Image (cartoon, helix red, strand yellow):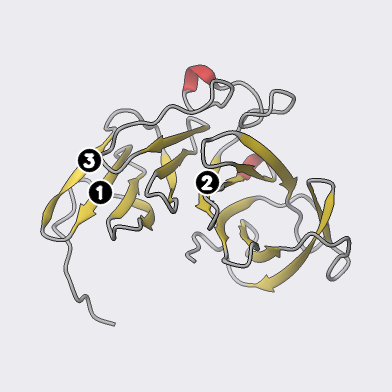
Amino acid sequence: YQIQTPLPPAPANFFPAAIAVDPNGNVWVTDTVSGRLDKFQSGVAPATCSAGVFLNPTGVAADPSGNIWVVDQRANTLLKYDQNCNPIALPANLPFQISLNLGAGGDPNGAPFSSPQAIATDASGNVWIADTQNNQVREFDSNGYYLNQFPVVDASGAAGQPTSIAASADGSVWVGLSDGEIEKYSGSNAYSYGGLIGAFNASVYPITTLATSQPAAFAR
């Protein structure tokens, strides 16, 4: 592979953790050490979004409408931005700011986010978060309202730590675990694959486990 259209030079002290491409072809990168979100466009100087807002932004995703979603592992927060780096307000019961860290990612009956490391969007604009230390995947709609969550288990049936996530066109959700596994959660039929099941929205999702080595990121 060769770089066909080189991007402008990266900002100083650049430590990229995750990358996403929006429908307009812009490239968005979370800079985890410097604590910022950077936007790259061909032939244009990089733009730094929300400098000083993040503590440790790890995951970034672009939805079909071009909105940018970011999870901050250290702050346990979810944030949303438009194409011009302007923050978009999320529902009041969602812990999108440190001071509003109330409930399970919008679920007032659950625990707060715990070190969420990755985020993905699907074709419908729903948002999926790998809530790592809670051993769960959480789903939100395109406006940031909490929809549901399901537990992540490893090949032995024990609680697994999701560290990367992607949503495919057929509605499946792919999850990378810290122990080196990749799992596929899909369908709404009440059956299991390989004896492992993941409960989601009162349905049973089959899990396909593939061998790998400490998956850090996914793309769809």
Q: Amino acid at mark 3?
A: Thr
Between 117 and 106, the one lying in front of the other is 106
Q: Earlier in the sequence, mark 3 or mark 1?
A: 1
Q: Earlier in the sequence, mark 2 or mark 3?
A: 3
Could you tell me which residue is drawn at 55 percent across and 53 percent down?
124
Question: In the orientation shown, which residue stands out farthest toward the bottom?
Answer: 1
Could you tell me which residue is drawn at 59 percent across and 22 percent down?
93
Residue 117 marker: 2
Residue 48 marker: 3
Q: Earlier in the sequence, mark 1 or mark 2?
A: 1
Q: Tag 3, which secondary structure?
A: strand
Between 204 and 181, the one lying in front of the other is 204
Q: Where is residue 176, by image quadrant? A: bottom right
Q: Nearer the viewer, mark 2 or mark 3?
A: 3
Between 150 and 83, the one lying in front of the other is 83
Q: Tag 1, which secondary structure?
A: strand
Q: Nearer the viewer, mark 1 or mark 2?
A: 1
- Disc 1 designates what residue? 39
> Spatial distance from mark 2 to mark 3, Cα to Cα?
21 Å
Could you tell me which residue is drawn at 49 percent across and 60 percent down?
217
